[in-house]
Amino acid sequence: MFSPLTSQIASAFSIFQNIPLGITPFGEGLIHETLLLSQGDKKWILQGFNQAVFNFPDRIDHNLSMLYQHAENHPLPFQLPLPIKNKSGSGLTEINGLNYRLFDFVRGKTLQQIENPMQAYIAAKAYGEFAKWAEEVDAKQMLETIPNFHRLDLRFEKLAQVSKTKSGNTAEEQEILDFYLSQKPLVDWYLNQIRKLPLRVTHNDTKINNLIFSENLERVVALIDLDTLMGGFLMYDFGDLVRTVACSFPETHTDWKSIHLDTELFEQLLKGYWEGVKDMATPSEADSLLLSGEVMTLIMGLRFFTDHLQGNIYYRVTYPEQNFHRAKNQMIFLKSQQNQREELQEIWNKITKAH
Ligand code: GN1
Ligand code: MG
């Protein structure tokens, strides 16, 4: 398949040969458009940059260059892919009013869902090692690429406010709305935590498909989707792992009865993440990990439901009710975590208190 986009890309960069580029859709990201480019046996990722979501591309560059400076003297065991510069030296290339970024294709495998507990351990260890590696990078100097991205209290207020402007909810919509608005105690727990937590360099979108594993799935070769990388709390990164890895099914799943927290996967995640961060984590940071899965699941549920009420203006959907279904999925998963708090506490004690 060839398109005018590919010929414009081909002429904007000096790395291509003078033969046509192949192009196909790729991956499952919800924000940017992701395409696979190929020429002979060479491959690249071409990303249609979503500037409506990321209003500050310069801030992304700022944060990533801080990391790259650190990497000069502190090698990481995996790659953090950066955009390739075009002929004018920019990472962003404008074509027909849209911005594109080009990345080297990292060979390996991505998973939408893990296949065994070992993969949960490996994934979490990589994110934990990353946080530890970035410990000396001054998170306060990083810029917010999306302001207030993981502010649970503000996401909660936003849903409360948007829901007031909408009438005529179905009974099921009302039930889900009421559930989310009943989560104030978790929002208060979160507010109480963040007062005590040091700012760290965090990835902030640690869902499982933002890792590239080696072909044999035995190690992580790259962390991708670095646009939300900024100052944050360990709670965010561990919590999003719990949300996307310790659940029996992905966030798009609609067989409601089968959605639940798998405590064995939670244990493997905590084991792996804790191995990465234990030498730097403060006691408050250790405490914050316990309900971090609930916090991140609530954030995403609130965001999906708000987007549903607003008419799917933010997340890519493949059918009109999809954000509603995602919000329902996250509600069920959040309830499952809340019903298993005691088991999670025991696992947490066993891992974080073992010395
Ligand atoms: C978005 O772009 P993608 O699909 O990796 C979103 C995350 C959500 C995720 C839910 C910038 O991530 O916050 O967790 O969808 N990214 C942004 O699948 O909003
Ligand atoms: Mg992604």
Image (cartoon, rainbow, N blue to C red):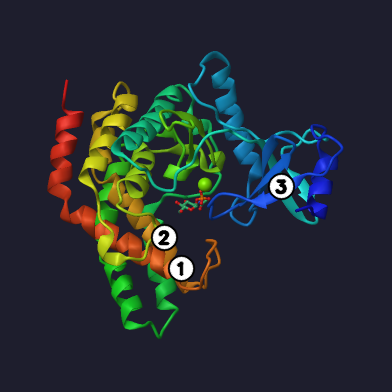
Task: Indicate which disc residue 100 carries.
Answer: 3
Q: Position of residue 89 (x, y in %)?
A: 78, 33
Local crowd size for mark 3, using a 10 Å CA cut-off: few (<14), some (14–19), many (≥20): many
Q: What's the residue type where badge 1 is placed?
A: Gln
Task: Indicate which disc residue 312 carries.
Answer: none
In the picture as drawn, the residue positioned furthest to the bottom comes out as: 168
Check disc 1 and report the residue beneath it: 322
In the image, is 53 to the left or to the right of 279? right
Nearest to the observer: residue 303 or residue 13: 13
Q: What element carries label 1?
A: helix
Nearest to the observer: residue 322 or residue 113: 113
Q: What residue is at 84 percent from the left and 40 percent from the top? A: 19
- Residue 191 visible? The answer is no
Q: Which of marks 1 and 2 is nearer the N terminus?
A: 2
Q: Earlier in the sequence, mark 2 or mark 3?
A: 3
Check disc 2 and report the residue beneath it: 252
